[in-house]
């Protein structure tokens, strides 16, 4: 297995994107999977490396990357040293980052096998919403899979709440990262960016207009994103497939750091279900 870790994708006047590529050398074009992490997520979280290896064993090339404004840096991609970038993140930037990754793959480079037989997206949590919006808009995507995905970005702003009004007044709000104990800042530009692109950022609209196969994977015991959201996504696209993994939480019973050499059973089920769908 060839593993290329912490490669840097640079673009003029833009923050770099850090990515990993996993694949086996083969003469034939192989299907390629791009994995999009979620909110407060990063490519090196928990057992994502074992997920990548499982896909390679099944004949895929697997790419996972950090969104450019996720708070990590090239030097330290795990502990969120760049809170200024985190505060400046928004959905437009994440969709642009995914586009940059796709363009880079399309252009061909030494890190990624030159030809792929298909390109699929997997998005976890908020990354699921990003993957769905991108898959609807970009005909380079052949299939899309969500893991524990949100169904509605707008609902998460809680526009009628006191905390939202306070955020609007002060221009910044903070969310604790339970892993690092940092207070992560969100500038109000995040909401403004959403409002300016509300139709584009509607997951419901994207799913209803989706022209490629969709698999929705969700844990039955997800305390962060309810299975109701998975069922909503499924209802907007009757051709889609819904797989509820019994006993799985929001991260399919993995954690960070993941010291085991095997995937937890629930995440392994999510991987196997996804591979079967993509094949």
Image (spheres, rainbow, N blue to C red):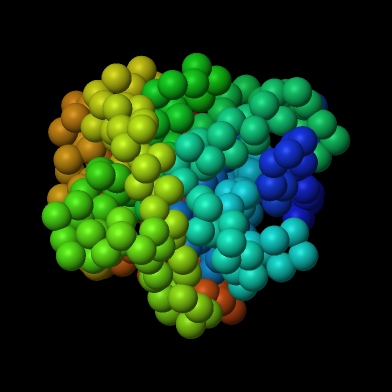
Q: In the rendered image, is residue 175 in sight?
A: yes
Q: Residue at x 23, y 38 (%)?
A: 233
Residue 266: x percent and y percent? 37, 63
- 275 over 134 or under it: above or below: below
Towards the viewer: 109 or 70: 70
Towards the viewer: 169 or 44: 169
Q: Residue furthest bottom?
A: 181
Residue 124: x percent and y percent? 42, 51
Residue 141: x percent and y percent? 51, 24
- 207 over 19 or under it: above or below: above
Q: In the rendered image, is residue 207 in sight?
A: no
Residue 254 found in image quarter: bottom left
Residue 238 found in image quarter: top left
Residue 6: x percent and y percent? 75, 55
Towards the viewer: 57 or 18: 18
Q: Residue furthest front?
A: 169
Q: Residue at x 51, y 46 (%)?
A: 36
Q: How many marks?
A: 0
Q: Residue at x 54, y 69 (%)?
A: 46
Say left or right for 254 vs 65: left
- 270 over 27 or under it: above or below: below
Q: Residue at x 39, y 23 (%)?
A: 136
């Amino acid at each position: 297995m060839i593993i290329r870790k912490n490669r840097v994708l640079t673009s003029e006047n833009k923050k770099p994107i850090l990515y990993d590529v996993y694949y086996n050398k083969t003469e034939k074009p192989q299907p390629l999977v791009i994995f999009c992490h979620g909110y407060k997520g990063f490519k090196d979280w928990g057992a994502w490396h074992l997920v990548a290896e499982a896909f390679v064993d099944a004949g895929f090339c697997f790419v996972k990357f950090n969104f450019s404004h996720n708070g990590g840096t090239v030097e330290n991609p795990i502990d969120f040293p760049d809170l200024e970038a985190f505060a400046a993140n928004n959905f437009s930037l994440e969709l642009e980052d995914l586009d940059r990754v796709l363009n880079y793959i399309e252009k061909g480079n030494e890190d990624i096998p030159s030809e792929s037989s298909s390109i699929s997206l997997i998005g976890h949590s908020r990354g699921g919403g990003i993957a769905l919006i991108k898959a609807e808009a970009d005909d380079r995507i052949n299939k899309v899979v969500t893991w524990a995905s949100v169904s509605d970005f707008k609902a998460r702003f809680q526009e009628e709440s006191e905390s939202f009004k306070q955020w609007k007044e002060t221009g910044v709000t903070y969310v604790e990262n339970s892993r690092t104990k940092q207070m992560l800042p969100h500038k109000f530009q995040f909401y403004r960016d959403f409002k300016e692109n509300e139709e584009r950022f509607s997951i419901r609209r994207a799913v209803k207009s989706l022209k490629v196969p969709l698999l929705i994977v969700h844990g039955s015991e997800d305390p962060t994103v309810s299975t109701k959201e998975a069922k909503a996504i499924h209802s907007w696209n009757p051709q889609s497939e819904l797989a509820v993994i019994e006993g799985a939480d929001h991260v399919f019973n993995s954690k960070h750091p993941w010291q085991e050499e095997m995937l937890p059973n629930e995440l392994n089920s999510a991987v196997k279900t996804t591979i079967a769908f993509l094949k």
